[in-house]
Image: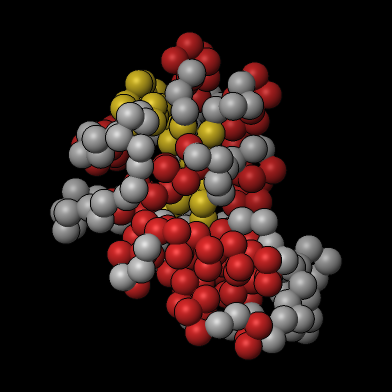
Amino acid sequence: MQNLNSEQPNTPVATNPNTVISVFIAEDHEVTRFGIKAVLESFSEIKLVGEAADGKVAYGEILSTNPDVVLMDIGLPSIDGIELSRKIKSAAPQIKILVFTSRESSDQILAAFAAGADGYCLKEASNSQLHIAIKTVAEGGVWLHPAIARVLVARCITPAGQSGQNNINQNIPYEVLSVREHEVLRLIVDGMSNQEIAERLVVSLDTVKTHVRHIFEKLAVNDRTQAALKAVRAGWVG
């Protein structure tokens, strides 16, 4: 985990002041777990409800505490994070799982989502990115670290440069989006929330939501992750 506590103060993320997101940490590395706890404690709307260094122990405590989000490392002893995700989703599908790991293998990424993960965040993430990732999955969305989106895009491209059977159709001209919509899409790829995009572009939150809705409609996607993947694969963002 890259020095999560040493960066500039977190960019505020819009939230209902009465909403509290309960989080459970499943992480076997003690120093890393300590750092994550310190970061989470800096977010007023996030409440840490438990932690465990072992997959088997984590499973019982997660079902007992029923958190909104489980921050999950893959390399857990006893039961690894992928199998643990599968077990949690089978027993309590309402619990959201955010994989938080240093592993970037496309096979592990795909396995994590197949097991029910709702997001995949690398430990090199900034405080702000982790904050956004937790909020996104807690609210029912899917969150991908930008580097992970690129890994998945690469997995979908055949050596001949042709789309594989799992590719998202990319036969969409650049001009289908307006200049402002391209700006919004680039910020989505960077992992920004709607509120952060509104602040960056100096527009209202409702305006950003309208742009995002139009982007989804024009790209024929259902969520921010699919939009980001399509933008990266089309070469619209670097």
Residue drawn at x 53%, y 63% as measured from the top left: 210
Vertical placement of 197 versus 2: above or below? below
Q: How is the image coloured?
A: secondary structure
Q: Is residue 145 above or below residue 156?
A: above
Q: How many marks?
A: 0
Q: Could you say which quadrant of the image residue 50 lies in?
A: top left
Residue 64 at x, y = what percent? 48, 11
The residue closer to the viewer here, 103 or 131, is 131
Q: Name the spot of residue 51 as percent of width and height, x first.
A: 36, 24
Q: Residue furthest right?
A: 165
Q: Relative to the observer, which residue lies in front, 234 or 111?
A: 234
Looking at the image, can residue 148 be seen? no
Which residue appears at 16% of the width and 58% of the height?
A: 8
Q: Measuring 30% from the left and 53% from the top, which residue is drawn there?
A: 128
Residue 8 visible? The answer is yes
The location of residue 98, given as percent across then percent down, is 49, 41
Residue 162: image quadrant is bottom right
Rendered view: 177 above or below 138: below
Work out whether 53 lies above or below 222.
above
- Taking the spot 51% from the left edge, 51% from the top edge, the residue there is 143
173 displayed left or right of 99: right
* In-front residue for pair 234/223: 223
Camera-side residue of 130 and 58: 130
From the top left corner, tell me how far across and down residue 183 is, in percent: 45, 77
